[in-house]
Image: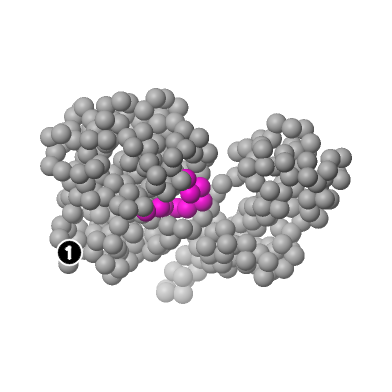
Amino acid sequence: MKQGRNIAFILFDGLKMLDVTGPAEVFAEANRLGGDYTLSYVSASGRPVTTSVGIELAVSGTVQTTPTPDTLVVAGGDCLITDPIPADLVDAVRDLYPRVRRVVSICTGSFVLAAAGALTGRRATTHWRHTRLLQRAYPDVEVRADDLFVEDDGVFTSAGVSAGIDLALALLEQDQGPDLARAVARNLVVFMQRPGGQSQFSAPLDAQRPRTPALRSVVDLISAQPALDHSASTLANRVGVSARHLSRLFATELDTTPAKYVEQVRLDHAKTLLDRGCNVSETARSAGFGSVESMRRSFVARMGTLPSHYRSRYATTQTNVQRAATVLETRE
């Protein structure tokens, strides 16, 4: 067993509670199974904070009054996107992060790290809704939009809420080995563990609505009927523009190519069908991939997993409930 670790969570008003409690439960469960972590909770002011769900969390002090931790964790919160980041929070992180062994952000906590200078020249990620904003606001950060979590020389950033649990399991494995991490994952009934490079599964394309009528028409058609022929030339003919002009519109407004956009729509459609319980071959045909092999390549390249694995792991709640009921029946 490796030496004990002191993990400090820096809290602020409006934080997402699961960004704290999810990773904290991983380390607390590790302690119950023989791990050696000390968890502390601080705020820039030393006062309690109110979470996004209205629950007040107590703290043990400020960054200055707490012994320098091994690991600093910065939670996320919608307020970090909608409001100016509190200056005292940025100052506290800027003061502490150079002195810790590793610094971690969950979800939009990456914006605090970026504001404090901890991400300058580094690779990082955040919730998929805000990766473009992070890149625009901090062009000196290499934003990895699809990754669940990213490590760059002791600085760890993760995607939205549940990805914080994946990252905590990875840190646990790094500290105290895979056996304890697997045991914690089993006890918490989570997968051990989605790799950091795996795509953030749910990134709906309708978050970006094109301004140009021709492009809106194209993307609406792709979304409504993903199985049609959507080559660049065919799409361009449908709206009366050249293929080159259509490619420029995709690049300017959606920061992608027609082919990549079509593939992503088909992938999202395939995920929906698999979630509903459709088999892999039926899904490949309905989503427009043409073949199971083509869909398999897309899943592996963009999501780091196979369609069959996705279907078994990310099925609907009802499917999981039915499966659990079947297991219980066989035990009786």
The quarter in which the C terminus is drawn is bottom left
Which residue shows up at 30% across the image and 31% down it? Answer: 90
Q: Which one is in front, 167 or 52?
A: 167
Which residue shows up at 74% across the image and 44% down it? Answer: 247
Q: Which residue is mark 1?
A: 2
In the figure, is residue 172 to the left or right of 122?
left
- The 10 Å Cα crowd at callout 1, few under 14, some 14 to 19, many 20 or more, is few
Q: Which one is in front, 196 or 186?
A: 196
In the figure, is residue 330 to the left or right of 180?
right
In the figure, is residue 193 to the left or right of 131?
left
Asked if the magenta segment contains residue 272, the reply would be no
Figure check: 284 above or below 150: below
Where residue 140 appears, as percent x and y from the top left, is 44, 40
Q: Which residues are magenta?
A: 143-151
Task: Residue type at mark 1: give it.
Answer: Lys
Where residue 66 appears, as percent x and y from the top left, is 14, 38
Quadrant of residue 267 within the rendered picture? bottom right
Figure check: 38 above or below 16: below
Residue 19 visible to the viewer: no
Which residue shows up at 62% across the image and 66% down it? Answer: 297
Where residue 278 appears, as percent x and y from the top left, is 65, 63
